Image (cartoon, rainbow, N blue to C red):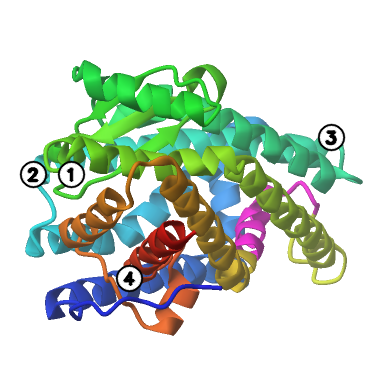
Amino acid sequence: MEAESPVLPPDSAEARRYNRIRRWLGIAEFALSLALLVVLVITGWTGWLRDLAYQGAFQSYALAVFLYTVMLVVIGKILGLGMDYYSFRLEHRYRLSNQKLRGWIWDEVKGLLVSAVLAAALVELLYFIIRQFSQHWWILAWLGFLGVVVLMAQLAPVILFPIFYKFEPLQDEDLKLRLVRLGERAGTRVRGVYKWRLSEKSKKANAALTGLGNTRRIILADTLLDNYSADEVEAVLAHELGHHVHKHILKSIGVQAGVTLVGFWAANWVLRYAVDRWHKFPALYDFANLPLIVLIFAVLSFLLMPALNALSRFNERQADRYAFENIASVAPFISSMNKLAEQNLSERTPSRWVEWWFHSHPAVARRVAAAESWEKQAASG
C-alpha cells in the first residue's frame, strides 16, 4: 500500500512555474512534430522530398534513402530550433544552467549530426528489410530494433555520452571502493566509477549506473559529488543498483519489445492500406511513407504514456525499497531526495493528474514518505 505523503512545505511558486513551463514546452514540441508528420503525409510533400532525394542521389535507392532521412532530420531541427533556444534560455532564467551560448550552439550541431547519422543508418536498415522481405518485413524490423536497443545500451556510455560530456575516473578512492562494494553486494560487476563533469553545462545533479557487460559503469555528476555527503551519494547509487537487482533494464526492454511489436504490426497494416486502397504510395518500399510510420509510433507512444509511466513509477518504488534495505539509515536517502528536488527545482508535490500523466518517477513527497514508513516498520519489527 502506498505511503501517505508527509507534511512538507508547499513547492515554491518558482518551482511550480518552471515545471509548468517545461510541461507545456514538451507538449508544444510533441504537437509540432506530430503536425509536421501529418502535413508531410496529407499534402504529399513527402513525395516531393523523395523525388528531390532521388535527383541528388542520381537515382540510387540507398543514397536517396540516406538523403531523404537527413532532410527530414534537418527540417525537424529547423522547425524546433526556436523552442530549443527557449529551453536554453529557460534554464538560465531559473539559474539552472552554466552553459554559454557558444557551447549550446556546438551541442546543437553535434546533436544534429549524431541524430542524422543514427537516423539514416536505422532507416537504411528498415527499408532494406522492407524491400527484400516485404511479406514479413515488420517482424524482421522488430527483431532488428531489439538488437539495436541492446547494442545502443552497451555502446552509449563509451561512444555517445562522451560526445556531449566529459568523464574522468573518480579520484576519491574511499568513495570509489565504497560504491564498488555496494555494486558487488547487488551482484553486478562495475567496470569503473567516473566523475561526470556536468557542472560545465548545468547546476542540476544526477547519477546513474549505465552500460551493459564490459561497459557497465557508475557515473556521478560533479554537482552531486561537490554538494552531497558520502552517505547521500551511496543512497543515490543504492537506488540505481536496485534497478539492476530487480532486472528493470531487461524488463523495460521486454515491455518496449511488446509495444514496438504492436507498432510494427500497425505500421504494416496502415502501409498496406495506404498502398493498396488509399494509393498514397506506389509501393511498400517507397521511403516517402517514412513519416507515416513515425506518426504511428508517435501516436502509440502518446496513448501508452500513462501506462508506461505507471510501470516506471512502480520500478522506481522497487529500487527505492532496495536502497532502504541496503544502506545503514534512510536519513541520507531522505536528505538526498530533498536536496535533489531543491537543486533541480523539481516539484515535491505535483498534482495527481500531472504525476499520473507526465512523471516517470514518484513524487519526492511520496518517496520520502515511503522511506519514513519503512524506517518505522523496521524499528517496530
* Magenta stretch: helix, strand or loop mostly: helix
State which tag comes first along the sequence, 4 or 2: 2
State the residue at coordinates (83%, 63%).
Answer: 269
Q: Height in image: 201 above or below 290?
A: above
Q: Alpha carbon of mark 4 to alpha carbon of mark 2: how far?
A: 34 Å
Instruction: Give the secondary structure at mark 2.
Output: loop
Position of residue 82 measured from the top left corner of the image (x, y, whole percent): 24, 63
Amino acid type of disc 4?
Ala
**Residue corresponding to mark 3:** 132
Q: Which residues are magenta?
A: 283-298
Residue located beneath label 1 in the image: 104
- Can you identify the residue that label 4 sits on? 365
> Which residue is outermost to the right?
135
Dot 3 or dot 2, earlier in sequence: 2
User: What type is the residue that disc 3 sits on?
Assistant: Gln
Dots 3, 2 in contact, CB < 8 A: no
Secondary structure beneath dot 1 equals helix
Q: Toward which corner of the image does residue 233 lie, by quadrant?
A: top left
Front-lying residue, 310 or 24: 310
At label 3, counting other C-alpha atoms closer than 10 Å, the crowd grade (few under 14, some 14-19, many 20 or more) is: few
